[in-house]
Amino acid sequence: MMEWTDRHCRYFLRLLSRHALLYTEMVTSAAIVHGDRARLLDFDASEYPVALQLGGSDPRELAESARIGEQWGYREINLNVGCPSDRVQSGRFGACLMAEPALVAECVAAMSAAVAVPVTVKCRIGIDERDSWEELHEFVRLVSEAGSRTVIVHARKAWLSGLSPKENREIPPLVYPTVHRIKQEFPELEIVINGGIDSLDACREQLRHVDGVMLGRAAYHNPWLLAQVDAELFGDAHPVPSRHEALEAFLPYVERQLRAGRRLCQISRHVLGLFQGCPGGRRFRRHIAEQGYKDDAGIEVLRDAAAWVPRDMGAPPPRATIGGYAPC
Ligand SMILES: Cc1cc2nc3c(=O)[nH]c(=O)nc-3n(C[C@H](O)[C@H](O)[C@H](O)COP(=O)(O)O)c2cc1C
């Protein structure tokens, strides 16, 4: 998620789930071809598996970026056809490409020919007045025939003018049945649903209809949600760290990043939601917000912040709490 997630965030989330596939924020193909690749693409091996999301509409440039991404170690290359921001539209990529399904198919075909890893597409259910079932069906048909065997669908349309990106994530109504219908019509495709899904119960309900669930804001604001997915959704009941243990496990990485010249606040923002809903959770956030931005802030800020939350309040989820949040 642009301006929210980054490699530090993914490193932290990977401590909570071994199985969830993590995506980069959108990176434009032009930036990868012409820009500072190490800065844009480097990730820590322990973040694996990670998918690289590209933005663009030039088939050759996308193919080149996909090839670079694959060589860099990304496990999947995803094309963004869902972002409605003005900036993205003026570059002719993101959600506005839903109006050009043949071009998207050309991009997917070029990317698929360039790499062995899966090429996937993330789209909306429609844009502006182009939100009929037939148009969505045609879009999915074309991109799947071009090589995208997985389609991630944000279950709301986007208005390309008049709404901000934030409003476009909130105002157009979620229409889950449309995504379910896509799965019915294309049973051979892997259909992943996205939008407004914020609990394991909601994931389970969606998984009755589709193959996968993508979590955005919920996972960012309440990262501990991911601590439950390995056991509850992937069937791998390895021991889950408590919230305190997860934070402690993150600290050596944070220290390495600080030594490399990063500031604590660049990294600590990703853990602010860790104790969401726990007694002391607000003090945890506030301590980091007040202390974490200082030039000399070190990992003790995170330890001191965690001390506001009683240790037994950060315990791992008992299996019996399936579907609800464990008592912090
Ligand atoms: C700050 C922010 C940045 C986002 N950036 C991206 C992005 O780079 N690529 C993308 O496909 N979606 C992006 N999204 C959209 C989310 O991936 C997701 O589709 C949307 O928030 C709806 O899902 P959710 O309700 O689970 O958050 C972004 C969302 C937010 C809040």
Image (cartoon, grey):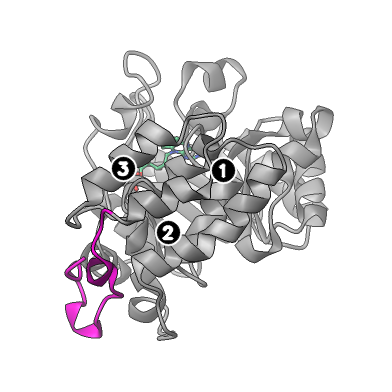
User: Which residue corresponds to mark 1?
Assistant: 6
> Does 82 lie within the magenta span?
no
Q: Is residue 148 visible?
A: no
Place of residue 156 in the rendered image (x, y in percent of width and height, measured from the top left): 31, 39
For the point 37% across and 15% down, the residue is 161
Q: Is residue 226 visible?
A: yes
For the point 51% across and 49% down, the residue is 299
- Are the two marked residues, 2 and 1, in contact with CB atoms closer than 8 angstroms? no
Which secondary structure, mark 2?
strand
**Amino acid found under the numbered disc labelled 3:** Arg
Q: Nearer the viewer, residue 34 or 136?
A: 34
- Are the two marked residues, 3 and 2, in contact with CB atoms closer than 8 angstroms? no
- The residues bearing labels 2 and 1 have C-alpha atoms spaced at a distance of 22 Å
Quadrant housing residue 289: top left
Query: In the image, 318: left or right of 84?
Result: left
Q: Earlier in the sequence, mark 3 or mark 2?
A: 2
User: Which residue corresponds to mark 3?
Assistant: 285
> Does 310 lie within the magenta span?
yes
Q: Earlier in the sequence, mark 2 or mark 1?
A: 1
Which secondary structure, mark 3?
helix
Question: Overall secondary structure of the magenta stretch?
Answer: loop
Q: Is mark 2 within 8 Å of ligand 1?
A: no
The answer to whether residue 20 is above or below residue 61 is below
Splitting the image into four quadrants, where does ligand 1 fall? top left
Marker disc for residue 192: 2
Front position among marks 2 and 1: 1
**Amino acid found under the numbered disc labelled 1:** Asp
Question: Which span is picked out in magenta?
Answer: 308-328
The answer to whether residue 110 is above or below residue 167 is below
Q: Quadrant of the C terminus?
A: bottom left
**Amino acid found under the numbered disc labelled 2:** Val
